[in-house]
Amino acid sequence: MAHYLLVRLGQAALVLLGIIVLTFLLTYLVPADPARMIAGQSATVETVARIRHELGLDQSLPVQFGRYLSHIVRGDLGRSYAQKVDVGELLRSRLPATVELMVAGILFELLIGLPAGVLAALRRNTWLDQVVMVGAFLGVSAPQFAVGLMLLYLVAFKLQILPLGGYGSVAHLILPAATLGIAGGGWYARVMRSSVVEVLTQDYVRTARAKGLPPSGVVLKHVLRNAALPVVTMVGLDFGTFMGGVVVVESVFGWPGVGQLAWQAIQIVDIPVIMGVVITSALAIVTGNLLADLVYPLLDPKIRYQ
C-alpha cells in the first residue's frame, strides 16, 4: 500500500505540473491584455506599458513561467492583478462556501440517484424502471440555470418557503444543492441501475439466493457493496468538479464560492486568480480520485494494491 501511495502521489505531481503548464500557456495566448484591462480603455500607452512592466508581463514566456513555478513550489499563488490581494487569501475566503455547496450537492445527488437506480434495477423492464430512467434523462438534460430559476420561482418566490438567494444558513444552501442534486442524481441513477443489473447476474448473488438468504439480505450484503464501486469513482470526480466551483449555480443563487471568483477573474483576465482556481480544482480532482481508490478495498475485499 505504501508503494502504491508513493506511485500515485508521483503521478499526481506530474498531472498537476502538466495542468499548470497547459493553463499558463493558454492564458499567455489569450488575445486580451491584462495590463490594458487594469488600466482601462482610456489609459495612455505609457500607463499600460508601466503596468505591464510592474506585473512582469513584458518578460519572455519562459522567464514568466519559471518565476511563477518557483512561487508555486513555495506555496505562493501570486497576487491578483485587479484586487491587489494574495490569490491564496482570495481562495481561502471563498473555499468555505464552496465546500458547503460541494458536500450538500453530493449528498443530494446520492439521495436522489442511488435509491432511484436501485429501484429501477430491481424492477427492471417495468413501468417503475421506465419512469426512473425518463426522470434521470430529464434531470441530466435540463440546464442547471433553468432548474435553478424554476426552483427559485416556485419554492422561494411563489411558496416563500426558502430564501431567494444569498449565503449564511442551511436555508440558503438547500436550493443550490438541490439544483446540483437534480442534474447529478440523474447520472447516479443511470450508473447505479446499470451496475446493480450487472451484479445481479453474478454467480455469488445466485448462490446467496440458493442458500435461502432473504431478498433484502442479498441486496444489502452482496449487491449494493459491489455495485457501489462506480458510484465511488463518480463521487471522487464530483469532489474535484465542485471544489472548482459551479459557476452557473453560484451565479443564479448569488453563492460566494470559487466558481463566482473564477468567472470574475476571467472577465478581467486576472491570470493569477485564474491559475489559482485551476490549480485548486486539479488538486481537488487528484485528491478525490486517490480517496476513491482507497475506499475500493473497503467495499470489495478482493481489491488489493501491491
Image (tube, grey):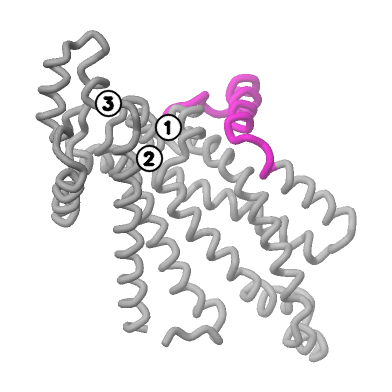
* Mark 2 element type: helix
Q: Earlier in the sequence, mark 3 or mark 2?
A: 3
Q: Residue at 64% x, 56% y: name it.
A: 188
Q: Earlier in the sequence, mark 2 or mark 1?
A: 2
Q: Quadrant of residue 139?
A: top right
Please state the horizontal and vertical placement of residue 108, each as a whole percent of the image: 57, 48
Assess whether mark 1 and mark 2 are in contact (beta carbons under 8 angstroms).
yes
Q: Quadrant of residue 120?
A: bottom right
Separation of residues labelled 2 and 1 (CA atoms): 7 Å
Instruction: Specify few, some or many for label 2: CA neighbours under 10 Å numbering under 14, 14-19, or 20 or more.
Output: many
Q: Which mark is residue 97?
A: 2
Front position in the image: 248 or 79: 79
Q: Residue at 35% x, 28% y: name it.
A: 264
Judging by the rendered image, the residue that carries numbered circle 3 is 33
Q: Which mark is residue 271?
A: none
Q: Which mark is residue 255?
A: 1
* Mark 1 element type: loop
Instruction: Specify few, some or many for label 1: CA neighbours under 10 Å numbering under 14, 14-19, or 20 or more.
Output: many
Of the residues shown, which amino acid type is indicated by label 2?
A: Ala
Front position in the image: 122 or 265: 265
Q: Nearer the viewer, mark 3 or mark 2?
A: 3
Residue range corresponding to the magenta coloring: 139-167
Separation of residues labelled 3 and 1 (CA atoms): 29 Å
Specify whether 276 is left or right of 305: left
Q: Residue at 25% x, 27% y: name it.
A: 34
Specify whether 241 is left or right of 31: right
* Mark 3 element type: loop
Q: Quadrant of residue 190?
A: bottom right
Q: Residue at 44% x, 84% y: name it.
A: 305
